[in-house]
Amino acid sequence: MNTQLPNKNIMTMKSTLIFVFLIVFLFNFQSIFAQKKEFIVVLDAGHGGKDPGKVGHNNAKEKDIALKIVLQVGEILEREKGIRVVYTRKTDVFVDLWERGRIANKADADLFVSIHCNAHNSQAAGAETWVLGIHVNRQNFEVAKAENSVILLEDNYEVKYKGFNPNSPDSVIGLTLMQEEYLDQSIQLASIIQEGFTNDLNRIDRGVKQAGFVVLHQTYMPSVLIETGFLTNVEEGAFLNSDAGQDKYSKSISSDILKYLQQITLNTVVGNNVAKNENISVSKTNTAIAKNTNNIFSKIEFKVQIASGANKIETKPYNFNGLTDVERVRVDGSYKYYLGSTSDYTEIKKVQELAKSKGYTSAFIVAFENGKKIPVEDVIKKS
């Protein structure tokens, strides 16, 4: 009997060591993922190499102007702590649309921004920003067709794009909208960019639009395509082709990307801070603050948006990875799908984490006041 005691002691020691190892491992594992992930922005200069893109007055080429603006935007963003910039090209080389999307996806990017210039047979002018969509009318199709036609210069494009024909409206409509869950974030960024062009650069606002751009279809993150202006317009073309004009466009675009980052950070970091306060013993002062915050939030209805798109989907658990009580709302010809409804910001954060655990990694919080959607950051500022 006594001869077995040392074996038991050894087994106990081994078990203790394994337990300690697991605790240390889990602590380090959590510490690694607790660190703030850098925000990765992919900047895509349209066209390049054998593909000049649009050509305007004084032989100004879209590929050259887009590259100059992209490099300047990247230089500004790289000065910001916590931001990493990835380029699809930094020189005058041809990069196919499939490769541009692959670069963004491989980098696990948080944002994809493609920069272009426009052209027309008239003196049309102004800036517009595009997101992926199936709202294909004749005019939108022609814009997408012009940008998508570059795939005809690529080797083996029939295989790469699985029979996609840039000259066919049916092909454009048939693009699978894998980007639908990022559509609202894409529109959010596009709206900020358009506002910047209008207010800061005094450009004609041609709005935020949707069309079937292949380069946007290839990416799995919020993505926009910017048409900075018309090279074929005498005044605007000269502005785009000047150092001063490119400098102003670069500053406007980089500032708008940072503004977008600030908005989405308020939607996550601030919420995490609220959640952390739950574990702190509440003093009289903290109680007063909490009551004041609750009074503000009591008028607000928070929800988590998990998806949006043109398809009308039955809100059954089997359609939403087991999530129950999903709400479908029709908004401007498309559908938005929400989870949860509460005036408690801490509670809606928990709902957001639940949605993410079910695979909706881009789920985000939205706020309503008297049934009208309002920016979440406005609610946070009030609190």
Image (cartoon, rainbow, N blue to C red):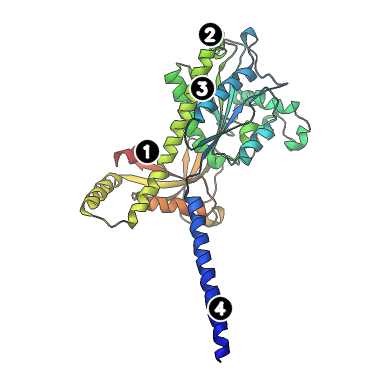
Label 3 or label 4, whichever comes before in sequence order: 4
Label 2, label 4: how far apart the Cα atoms are? 83 Å
* Residue 34 as seen in the image, left or right of residue 119: left
- Mark 1 touches mark 2? (CB < 8 Å): no
Quarter residue 154 falls in: top right
| SS at circle 2 | helix
Quarter residue 55 falls in: top right
Q: Residues within 10 Å of mark 1 (few under 14, many from 20)?
A: some
Q: Position of residue 240 (x, y in %)?
A: 55, 14
Label 1, label 3: how far apart the Cα atoms are? 26 Å
Label 1, label 4: how far apart the Cα atoms are? 55 Å
Q: Residue furthest right?
A: 156
- Mark 3 touches mark 4? (CB < 8 Å): no
Residue visible at 42% across and 44% down?
268
The amino acid sitting under disc 1 is Glu
| SS at circle 1 | helix
Image height of 381 relative to 205, above or below: below
Q: Residues within 10 Å of mark 2 (few under 14, many from 20)?
A: few
Q: Which mark is residue 250?
A: 3
| SS at circle 3 | helix
Label 2 or label 4, whichever comes before in sequence order: 4
Q: Which mark is residue 11?
A: 4
Label 3, label 2: how far apart the Cα atoms are? 19 Å
Q: How many marks?
A: 4
Q: Residues within 10 Å of mark 3 (few under 14, many from 20)?
A: many
Image height of 114 relative to 373, above or below: above
User: Which residue bears the numbered disc 1?
Assistant: 377
The amino acid sitting under disc 3 is Ser
Label 3, label 4: how far apart the Cα atoms are? 65 Å
